[in-house]
Amino acid sequence: DADSHDQQQQQQQHQVLLGKGTCCRPHDMSQDLSQQAAQVLLLRQKERSMRNCLSMIKCSGGAATSNLDSENDSDSEDEAPRGPPVKLRPKRKSQGRCFGIFPFLAAVRSSTGSSISIDVLAGLTVAVMTIPESMCYASIAGLPYILGLYASVTPQFVYAFLGQSRQLQVGPVAIVSLLLGDGLEGILSASQCPEWHLATEDPALRTPQHELCPEEFAKMAFLTSAMVGVILILACVFRLGFLLKFLGHPVISGFSSGAAIIIMISQLKNFLGAPVKNSGYPILTLKSAAESLVHVQPVTLGLGLLWTVGLISLRLLSQRNKKLRLLGAVGPLLSCIAGILLIRSCEQLQHIRGLEYVGTIKGGSFPPFSGCLLCIESDQIHVILRLASSIALMGFLEGFAVTQEFAKQLGYEAASRISTGQELFAVGAANLLGSVFSAYPCAGSISRSAVCNASGGTSQVAGFVAASALLAALLALCPLLYFLPKFALAAIVVSSVIKLVDFNVAVTLYKVKKNDFAMWFVSFGGTVVAGPMIGICMAVFLSLA
């Protein structure tokens, strides 16, 4: 009993010494106490190493975080760290700046295998939708179909590297194409387009310059794109993004609704199969269409209406059924494929007067250099500058609104943290570099960005994949579009822009605030009656008044 009592006192004494941190010799203890002492020594050694590491980091100016309590609660059987403590390097400021200027690098760095596969699928879906849409929008601008495809490649590549939005798709859009075609009409001089100046008719009734002199007209479009890029980059340098706050929603909505109606009126020629002369003034276009009703081709009109109803039905079906949400995105491509198969298989349709198809598409290669962008006469400078300012304003406003909306919905970044300056720089660089590779002015597309979001796109990788797929399509698919009917392209245009006509806004404004309704009505009426250029000027004036 005395021996056992002495042994218990010795154990209690050793435990007290261990708790106080006193140095003990393991061979003087029992086996259990020796193991406990060894564990305590290991924990002290780990704690000492962590403190040394933290002190070195603080001395070097870095920042580190450590939780010693969690270290003490770790498994006691872990091996003690070997060798000198590792010196952690703080994140360099230059690396953060690089990721800020090139968000694509940060997106790739944070991507995983599963997210990249989803982005690839989303990018391919966007590319499928972009092919027919870009061709349609090029025709609205009075440019060859191939230039619509060119304008979808280089600008999208540039924005994918520089843009902050993970879903925004940059390329041809309807309103910018309308502004470009209307603003450049009649700009070519007598030396650039002598056929147009030799005509004795009223300028509003002459054959458009883009049909008589397509190459010179395209050069003006490239020059306008370069000017748009310069304006946006200068706005970034001088921090003029705050001016967007002065553009009221009522006047922008009125202009968009009026522009959509003008675009639909411009497609009457392809629907009716009759010689309708498109004019910058919608009233003159409607007058020409009324005079050509005796030449309407019922087959062309019937097929055009059938294709339009089908596309709108697919879009509505995809909106109501989430399982079919991608059906609306591939609808334009399906309509083009169906039209090509119909014309190719039925030779009688190929010989119907008024039923036109695309024919041979010149180009079909990597986007070429646009040549001299300074081939401009002195009296054309102010016209190009005024047009580029209008396009830069409307195009950036549309794309930036989409960027903020997706940032709010997805919550990946607060809308207030979406840098207006970075977006101005990204879209400006896309237009400036795109003009070098035969691209006309571009902007953020609402429809294609929505498709990217619906397809699960999570980063700028989706935009990069979409541009790569479009480049591959340029090299391989152009010969297959020979029998693409123009009524199918017209149906795509109408089904795409009809959603921009929003009279519900006007009704709400009339009930809530009469002054805003008056601004909406003046902007809408001015656009429809006087044309898009007058309409955009009235919209800006009303916003600043």
Image: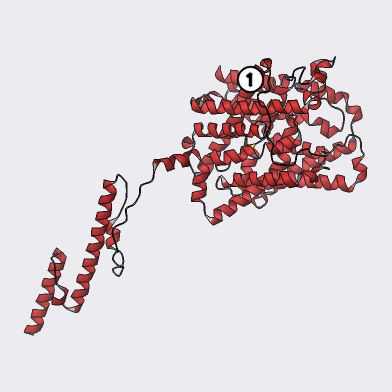
Query: Label 1 belongs to which residue?
Result: 386
The residue at 55%/46% (across/down) is 459
Which quadrant holds residue 451?
top right
Residue most extreme to the left: 2
Rendering coords of residue 182 (x, y %): 72, 24
Q: Amino acid at mark 1?
A: Arg
- Residue 325's spot in the image, x, y percent? 66, 49
Image: 95 above or below 530: below
Residue 194 in the image, given as x and y percentages of width and height: 80, 19
Foreground of the two, 501 or 32: 32
Q: Residue at x 13, y 68 (%)?
A: 16
At x 64% / y 50%, what residue is drawn? 322
Residue 508 visible here = no
Looking at the image, residue 203 sits to the left or right of residue 175; the answer is: right
Q: Position of residue 434 (x, y in %)?
A: 63, 34
Crowd band around label 1 with a 10 angstrom C-alpha radius: few (<14), some (14–19), many (20+): some
Whether residue 355 is visible to the viewer of this picture, yes or no, is yes
Locate residue 473 relative to residue 292 in the image: left or right.
left
The quarter holding residue 544 reads: top right
In the image, 235 versus 369, the foreground residue is 369
* Above or below, 387 relative to 61: above
In the rendered image, the vertical position of residue 69 relative to residue 241, given as above or below: below
Where does the C terminus fall, quadrant-wise? top right
Callout 1: SS: helix
Residue 365 position (above or below residue 529) = below
